[in-house]
Image: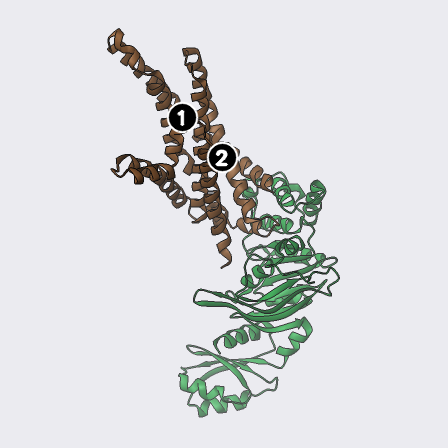
């Protein structure tokens, strides 16, 4: 039943002009960012004396900044994708169709989540051109690139789960998009507070709670089970909240 | 053991009650709907019809009491109920971006229908929508959308079909077609459909429930319910004005069931079929009412029903 739900969502996404517009804009924006980072790096290299050039790290200056930027762009591109997931069903009354069928609230939520997550992974596909270019440019460490993509995919899953939760809270798509943006932004804010706080323990706890902290670990090419467990827990909790909101219609 | 396929009844409500914050939508409904009938759920707008129907289908949980669909409780055994019930909500749950065929295929998948193309073809034929099967739902007229809504309720061949105001907003031709479709369904299904139009219920139904302000006012075969109202008549009186005291005075008359006062118009429901106009005029004169005109209506079920539902609700 999850797949039935996911297929329906995927079909709707591919039909939607908004989805294609987002793919186009996202590709344009990420391509432009990549180009600028490369040009900036080349300018920096030329601007410093030859013996200082080795101090400018290509991985940090281009690769990690590129994927951090892509992660930042997701903040703006995922809420428009998730805003209608449940709010639209509520507004149009089509939620009744699902609720009258032998399908559980969890199956509805997971099906919608999977379809949108897969779509955001597709959103990232055009950016695969960048690793190809970087490979030609001689970036030696491919594990970092793999880590970057794994981090983006995991982050996208968290953002989609948060957006879906936001969509379950309202019948208004604009409000759902705004709430989704705020929820995702909140996970970023935690990381920024962690960086600015003087209290080491508070900083560490906030960094652990924040999605960004775990992303930074993955981007460095370090894959740990605690990070993966964190992502699984975050997604599970967000989806669980959506299921609870959907179930609250009865009370 | 609750569930059993051989239940002589399709649906049973036991002390069914639903409260919303600050509002009681449905109060202690008790009734049984037998298998193989078309049952009308009749009541004015806001009477609690949709709430009752949603509880029957497991879309809403009762505050207290329960519904049993062929022996299964929608709260305890939702999948057993959902596989047996086809629902058309008040607003047909249609995806406007899908074609009719895609939509019905999706609905059939949701209900885990085994032979989906056959099931879709069957309901397309039944609802006379085969020729629009490849059109986008968003481009269809309201009449066709309603038919597609009915088709989705039938695609999994449910034993109980629940239609919430299926003819609302349709053109006369579509209304006739939908009513004919409802009648044809009772060959092998039980149909419950809600309406606020008494004549529609009279035309289509075998049994009816009348609900007003969340309360069940009448239930049973149409002929029995008609009998219940048959001993009543309605008198329309035009007066110069009527105070509360004067209206109360008239309500005390033994042959007056209820009075509805609208400025200079009095609708007096009589609990007798006898001609009591002369007595009524005398009583009104005694109450110092200036009578400008008076007309006794025959036993028009619809008007009597409307007044009864209004007055019971106020009581």
Along the horizontal axis of the image, is A41 left or right of A107? left
Residue B299 visible, this angle: yes
Q: Chain of mark 1?
A: A
Q: Which label number is shown at residue A219?
A: 1
Q: Which label number is shown at residue A117?
A: 2
Observer-nearest of B201 and B297: B201
Q: Earlier in the sequence, mark 2 or mark 1?
A: 2
The residue under the point 45% across, 36% down is A231
As helix, strand or loop, the secondary structure at mark 2 comes to helix
Classify mark 2: residues with Cα within 10 Å, few (<14), some (14-19) or many (20+): many
Observer-nearest of B190 and B57: B57
The residue under the point 33% across, 39% down is A190
Q: x, y (%) of residue A236? A: 48, 42
Q: Is residue B264 above or below residue B88?
A: below
Which chain appears green? B
Q: x, y (%) of residue B286? A: 45, 92
Along the horizontal axis of the image, is B203 left or right of A160? right
Residue B200 visible, this angle: no
Q: Is residue A142 above or below residue A218?
A: above
Observer-nearest of B233 and A211: A211
Observer-nearest of B206 and A48: A48
Q: Chain of mark 2?
A: A
What is the distance, in whole Å, between disc 2 and disc 1 at their CAs? Answer: 20 Å
Query: Are discs 2 and 1 both within one chain?
Result: yes
Q: x, y (%) of residue A186? A: 34, 40
Q: Is residue B143 above or below residue B254?
A: above
Q: Residue furthest top?
A: A50
Q: x, y (%) of residue B212? A: 54, 71
> Hue of chain A?
brown
Q: Is residue B309 above or below residue B2?
A: below
């Amino acid at each position: 039943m999850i797949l039935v739900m996911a297929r329906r969502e995927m079909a709707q996404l591919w039909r939607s002009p908004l989805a294609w517009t987002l793919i186009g804009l996202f590709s344009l924006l990420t391509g432009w960012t990549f180009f600028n980072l490369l040009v900036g790096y080349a300018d920096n290299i030329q601007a410093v004396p030859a013996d200082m050039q080795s101090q400018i790290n290509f991985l940090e200056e281009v690769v990690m900044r590129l994927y951090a930027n892509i992660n930042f762009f997701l903040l703006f591109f995922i809420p428009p994708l998730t805003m209608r997931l449940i709010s639209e069903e509520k507004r149009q009354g089509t939620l009744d169709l699902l609720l009258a069928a032998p399908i559980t609230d969890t199956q509805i939520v997971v099906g919608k989540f999977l379809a949108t997550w897969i779509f955001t992974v597709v959103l990232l596909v055009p950016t695969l051109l960048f690793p190809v270019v970087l490979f030609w440019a001689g970036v030696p460490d491919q594990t970092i690139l793999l880590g970057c993509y794994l981090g983006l995919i995991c982050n996208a899953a968290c953002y989609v789960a948060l957006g879906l939760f936001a969509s379950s809270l309202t019948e208004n798509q604009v409000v759902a998009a705004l709430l989704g943006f705020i929820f995702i932004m909140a996970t970023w804010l935690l990381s920024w507070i962690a960086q600015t706080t003087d209290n080491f323990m508070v900083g560490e706890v906030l960094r652990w709670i924040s999605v960004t902290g775990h992303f930074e670990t993955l981007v460095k090419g370090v894959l740990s089970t605690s990070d993966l467990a964190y992502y699984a827990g975050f997604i599970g909790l967000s989806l669980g909240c959506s299921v609870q909101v959907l179930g609250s219609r009865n009370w | 053991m609750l569930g059993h396929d051989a239940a002589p009844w399709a649906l049973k409500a036991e002390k069914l009650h639903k409260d919303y914050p600050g509002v009681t939508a449905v109060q202690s409904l008790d009734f049984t709907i037998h298998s193989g009938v078309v049952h009308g759920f009749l009541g004015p707008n806001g009477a609690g019809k949709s709430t009752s129907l949603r509880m029957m289908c497991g879309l809403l949980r009762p505050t207290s009491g329960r519904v049993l669909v062929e022996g299964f409780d929608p709260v305890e055994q939702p999948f057993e109920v959902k596989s047996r019930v086809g629902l058309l909500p008040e607003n047909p749950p249609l995806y406007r971006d899908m074609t009719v065929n895609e939509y019905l295929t999706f609905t059939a998948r949701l209900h885990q229908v085994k032979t989906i193309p056959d099931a879709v073809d069957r309901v397309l034929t039944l609802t006379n929508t085969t020729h629009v099967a490849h059109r986008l739902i968003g481009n269809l007229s309201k009449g066709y959308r309603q038919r597609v809504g009915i088709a989705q309720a039938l695609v999994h061949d449910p034993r109980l079909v629940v239609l919430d105001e299926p003819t609302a907003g349709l053109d006369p031709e579509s209304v006739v077609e939908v009513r004919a479709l409802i009648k044809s369904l009772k060959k092998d299904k039980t149909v419950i459909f809600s309406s606020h139009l008494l004549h529609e219920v009279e035309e289509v139904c075998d049994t009816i429930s009348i609900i007003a302000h969340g309360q069940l006012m009448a239930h049973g075969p149409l002929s029995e319910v008609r009998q219940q109202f048959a001993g009543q008549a309605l008198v329309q009186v035009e007066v110069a004005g009527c105070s509360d005291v004067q209206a109360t005075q008239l309500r005390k008359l033994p042959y007056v069931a209820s009075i509805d006062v609208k400025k200079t118009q009095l609708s007096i429901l009589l609990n007798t079929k006898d001609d009591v106009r002369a007595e009524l005029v005398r009583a009104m004169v005694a109450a110092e009412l200036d009578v400008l005109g008076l007309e006794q209506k025959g036993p028009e079920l619809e008007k009597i029903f409307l007044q009864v539902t209004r007055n019971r609700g106020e009581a």
